[in-house]
Image (tube, rainbow, N blue to C red):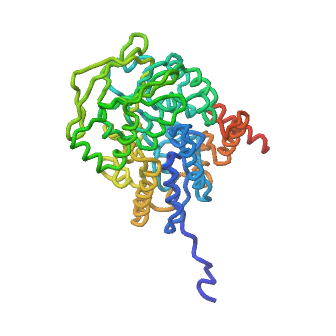
Amino acid sequence: MTADDETGPPPAPARLRVAVVGAGPAGIYTAEALTRQQDVPVAVDLVDRLPTPFGLVRHGIAPDHPKMRAIRDTLHRALDHPAVRFVGNVEIGRDISCRDLHAAVDAVVYTYGAALDRQLGVPGEELPGSLAATELVAWYTGHPDADRARVEAALARARSVVVVGVGNVALDVARVLARTPAELEPTDMPQHVLDTLAAAPVEAVTVLGRRGPAQATFTTQELRELGELAGADVLVDPADLDLDPATEERVAADRVASRNLAVLRDWAGHGPRPGRATVTLRFFSRPVRLLGEDRVTGVEVERTLVDADGRAAGTGETTVLPADLVVRSVGYRGGELPELPLDPHRGTVPNELGRVLRGGEPAPGEYVAGWIKRGPTGVVGTNKHDARETVATLLADVAAGVVRPGGSADAGPDGDLVGALRARGADPVLLEDWRAIDAAETALGATRGRARTTLHEWETLLAAVKAAAARVR
């Protein structure tokens, strides 16, 4: 008899237990990267404050973009992996602290994004009728935290709308507000959103860019979609497209900018047609003041010039645009999570290749990925490479002995994060619970001939979970 016969096979290596905070694209791509590698066995808990996964794919991409929103079908495959568990309805700082979470697992990757808006910093911005794009987008995508009363009050009187910003989100907002009810009816918007938009008296939307068309950050696909609106005409001042030779040369070398200019020039000189709304793209313009006493009535706009480095400066030439609603879409920033450091200027967690830095030094077992790591840049797919970089850093720390699989100290009665959460009184929503929400949304959509209608209230989302559980019992 050999020694192997006496002792049996060697024990299986301990699994690396990782909590990923945020179940949006960055978090799901992190889970995917962890489960695809073969060097270290893993168990991944995708922790999210909401009872639903997918983050900005669910509550950021405009509902009239069904092909882009369909990426959640791809993301769902990662949730179905046996080594991945969705743990929703869990808020860090309320249900468990960062410290206790770290004690319950071997490593934590924070991927909770950059959901706060940046402000214009101009007088009058606090007036009723002035909204952040984050507020409007949350409302029309059915985010359970959306302030319905605030948004719907602003829309009820909005004939003239000014959207500040020339990125994709600004175009999304302009496009959704200019859509006809028939165009929006097939989407998965909550019914109250469809009803409010159908009743909104929007006649004119003006999109302001403080720099020129060569510096705009929208994609050509988003831009072209404006020209396909059933009930609105796109207007562009030809003078805004008259570029100096140096800018023309830079545009020629930039494929996206070149395609964008071609689309804009096709629209230049178009006039409004009777009975149709207008979407006006106005460049070299920056808001300097929102006008009104009890609510917004207009925007004072200053003409700008762009220097050779792409910086905009005011010329002192001002005009006033009528506006019942002003929507700012000038960028996002990350918010603070209790106990986690945050650079207040960048709106990101200080890090090196995804390792969280505390006092300039790597914090063992703490990592970041996605927007909270690099800032709000790129598209959904950008998060895949970003997540892989962070996971490579984490695995390097495992190889170096900085992170030890099986080293978690307080993982609940059964060595399990969900057990630890329930012991603290939390009520986590797991994958089967999410499937109950998904089924309820599909069933609600079917009553109106749609593929889905989004449930938008916390109570309704959690009631779908309880109803499914009761049927099982």
- Which of the 4 quarters of the picture holds residue 181? top right
Closest to the observer: 97 or 55? 55
Instruction: Tell me if residue 162 comes above or below residue 46 in the rendering.
Output: above
For the point 79% across and 44% down, the residue is 473
For the point 43% across and 50% down, the residue is 369
Where does residue 468 sit, x and y in percent of width and height? 74, 41
Instruction: Tell me if residue 311 comes above or below residue 324 in the rendering.
Output: below
Where does residue 193 sit, x and y in percent of width and height? 59, 27
Q: Is residue 3 left or right of residue 369?
A: right
Where does residue 391 sit, x and y in percent of width and height? 44, 58
For the point 49% across and 51% down, the residue is 103
Viewport quadrant of the N terminus: bottom right
Q: Is residue 146 visible in the rendered structure shown here?
A: yes
Closest to the observer: 63 or 16? 63
Where does residue 410 sit, x and y in percent of width and height? 53, 51
Q: Is residue 415 visible in the rendered structure shown here?
A: no
Closest to the observer: 468 or 286? 286
